[in-house]
Amino acid sequence: MLLMISISLIIMMLTMLLMLISMTISKKMTINREKNSPFECGFDPKSSARLPFSLRFFLIAIIFLIFDVEIALILPTILIKFYSDPFFLMMTLSFFMFILLLGLFHEWNQGALDWID
């Protein structure tokens, strides 16, 4: 029991020593306000969080995520090819691609893919 306590104390002291050494050696400057801020993307963290945000950018991001997930659903069909009828596989993929293209044309007609007003 005493051995476990002494080993854990040694480990904690070694950990604290290594953390102290890394903090003193690191090249982190406390003067640089932008590097210390949680965001390094151009937003000022000290200003209001209620800044206007482009709704078109949000819609394009959502459309990308939807189509990206649907494309990821197509990938396992390579394995299905070995276990099922090729005609059934082609019909399923054709139906799935038809739904994808139908959604893409709907988004195009609604103007969600237009960047220019």
Image (tube, rainbow, N blue to C red):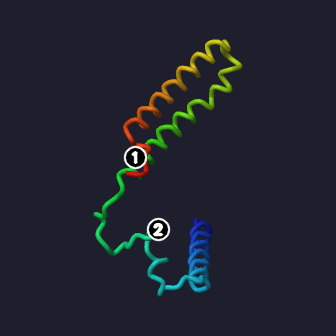
Residue 11 on image: x %, y %: 61, 72
Residue 44 vertical position relative to residue 63 in the rendered view, above or below: below
Residue 96 vertical position relative to residue 26 in the rendered view, above or below: above
Picture residue at 52% right of the left edge, 37% below the top: 69
Q: Give the SS element for disc 1.
A: helix
Give, as a three-letter code, the residue at label 1.
Leu
Picture residue at 41% right of the left edge, 52% below the top: 116
Picture residue at 57% right of the left edge, 21% below the top: 94
Query: In the current view of this chain or complex, which residue is farthest to the right?
Result: 82
Picture residue at 63% right of the left edge, 18% below the top: 90
Q: Which residue is mark 2?
A: 41
Give, as a three-letter code, the residue at label 2.
Cys
Q: Which residue is mark 1?
A: 59
Residue 61 on image: x %, y %: 45, 48
Q: Nearer the viewer, residue 57 or 4?
A: 57
Count all numbered tags in the image, as a single digit.
2
Disc 2 packing (10 Å; few <14; some 14–19; many ≥20): few
In front: mark 2 or mark 1? 1
User: Which quadrant of the structure image shows residue 46?
Assistant: bottom left
Disc 1 packing (10 Å; few <14; some 14–19; many ≥20): some
Residue 71 on image: x %, y %: 56, 35
Mark 2 / mark 1, whichever is N-terminal: 2
The quadrant in which the N terminus is found is bottom right
| Mark 2 vs mark 1, CA separation in Å | 20 Å
Residue 105 circle label: none
Q: Give the SS element for disc 2.
A: loop
